[in-house]
Structure formats: C-alpha cells, structure tokens
Amino acid sequence: MRILITNDDGIHAPGLVACEQIARALSDDVWVVAPETDQSGVSHSLSLNDPLRLREIDDRRFAVKGTPTDCVIMGVRYILKEAPDLIISGVNRGRNAAEDVIYSGTVAAAMEGTVLGVPSFALSQSYAFTTKHAPLWQTAIAHAPGLIRKVLSEGIPKDVLVNINFPDCLPDDVAGVAVAVQGKRDQELLRIDPRHDGRGNPYYWIAFERGGHTGAQAGSDLSALNELKISVTPLRLDLTDEPFMTRLAELLG
C-alpha cells in the first residue's frame, strides 16, 4: 500500500514525525510531501498567483512552498509516479473539531485527497492550551494504525473523508472510541486584538474570546474529547443543505 502523508504545521513539525510512524505501521511505501512553513488556518486554499517551489529533502521526502492542498496535488499529480492508495494528513498540533474543520489546513489536505479519489484521513492530537504542555503524540501513534485499518477494511464511501481527533491523555487512559457528529462551540467569538509596534504603528492579531461554557453537545466530537475518547467523524464534500434546498425550490420554483 502506497501512502502519501502531509500536514499544515510544516515539514519540520513533530506531528509529521508522528504521522510517519503511523504510516510506517501500515506500509513500507511512505511518501512525505509537506509545506515548507507553517500553514495552519489556510483551509482549502490554492496557490494560484505564486509559483510552487519544490525541495527534495531526502528519499521520498519533499517540502513545498505552498499550502497543504498544494502539497496533495503536487504529490498525487507530479511527485508520485503512481497514485497513492491512502492519504494521511497530520498529526495536527491541537484538535480539529467543531468549527475548526472549516479553517483547518489539515482537514483540507484530506479533503483534497478525497476530491482526487484517494481514501483520506485527517489526524489531530488535542493538548491543553491552559497548561501549554506538549501534545502527547504517543496517543495518536498508538491508536491511529488500528483505527485506520478498521475503517479501510470497511471501505470509505466516495466523496467522504474521515476526521479523527485524539484526546489529551496518555494512550492507556483513552476511554474508548466515539463515532461523533461535528460539534459546535459555545459562545466562542473571533475578535481583533489591536496593538502597536515599537515605532507606534498599529498592527492586529486575530484572537479568540470565549464566553461561558455550558458543555458540548452530546454525541459530538467535542463531547467525545471531553470524555477522553477518540472522536471519529466522517465529513462529506457535498455541503448542500437538502432540507433548505427543498424549501427554496418550493419558494422559488
């Protein structure tokens, strides 16, 4: 089985090393094509106005000056002489649950693999932002190969990718696996944090402002992670809201 791995944290990210270990537990034919620099939050963007720069680092290991989506296209359409059998994106530093999937370059890389007809997984390792401790990569490394094998044995439907988040705990403390819906956060808002540099010129950071937390929706990816379970969420490429489409057809047709 030929596996292409990528990420959005960049070619030097420790999560990519973890992803390689996961891939090599599944196959000896592993290729790495990852962004030259951190591309977190770029979602499914393509580099259309800038050329892609490709750097061969080692055998079957490449860095692309571009987005995670660029990396998947470069890997599948140019670097690999034959299409991969599997794409694994990650392991992301931090969870990609709830609304994160909209912004995530990790999820977008798996989405692009799905667009290209390759079974694809997005893997993310939760960690505590409050304590700032390093992600427990060993949790993803220990549990991901078995999960991927089971899902592949069943088969992934066309135009569907699998988003897996590992809880912030040691491998032996994982409380199980939850097949979960995409959740929604309580009262989390993006805000602009204005600042000034040493010369008095203004600059701005996009920041998060959290309000009161009333608990994650039961059955969601957030709820699973709170319970120290691995969340497994299938995501569809088709974003059509069929119930509202029917109502619009009645209204406008």
Image (cartoon, rainbow, N blue to C red):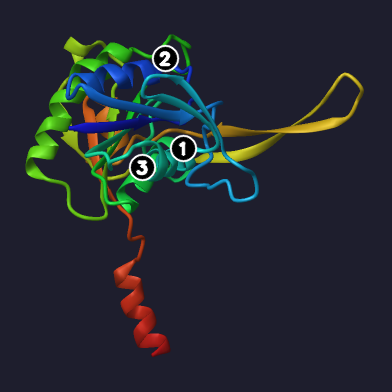
Q: CA distance from mark 2 to mark 1?
A: 16 Å
Q: Residue 68, labelled with which disc?
A: 1
Task: Return the x and y of residue 236 as percentages of the image width and height.
Answer: 29, 53
Query: Residue at left 45%, top 37%?
Result: 71
Mark in front: 3 vs 2: 3
Which residue in the protein does label 2 denote? 14
Seen in the picture, residue 184 relative to 10 is either above or below; the reply is below
Query: What's the amino acid at mark 3?
Result: Val
Query: What's the amino acid at mark 1?
Result: Pro
Q: CA distance from mark 3 to mark 1?
A: 12 Å
Residue 91 as seen in the image, left or right of residue 56: left
- Taking the view exactly as shown, the residue that stands out farthest to the bottom is 253
Query: Residue at left 41%, top 30%?
Result: 33
- Mark 2 vs mark 1: which is more N-terminal? 2
From the viewer's side, name the closer residue of 232 and 158.
158
Which residue in the protein does label 3 denote? 76
Q: Residue 214, labelled with which disc?
A: none
From the viewer's side, name the closer residue of 72 and 230.
72
- Mark 3 vs mark 2: which is more N-terminal? 2
Instruction: Report helix, strand or loop for mark 1.
Output: helix
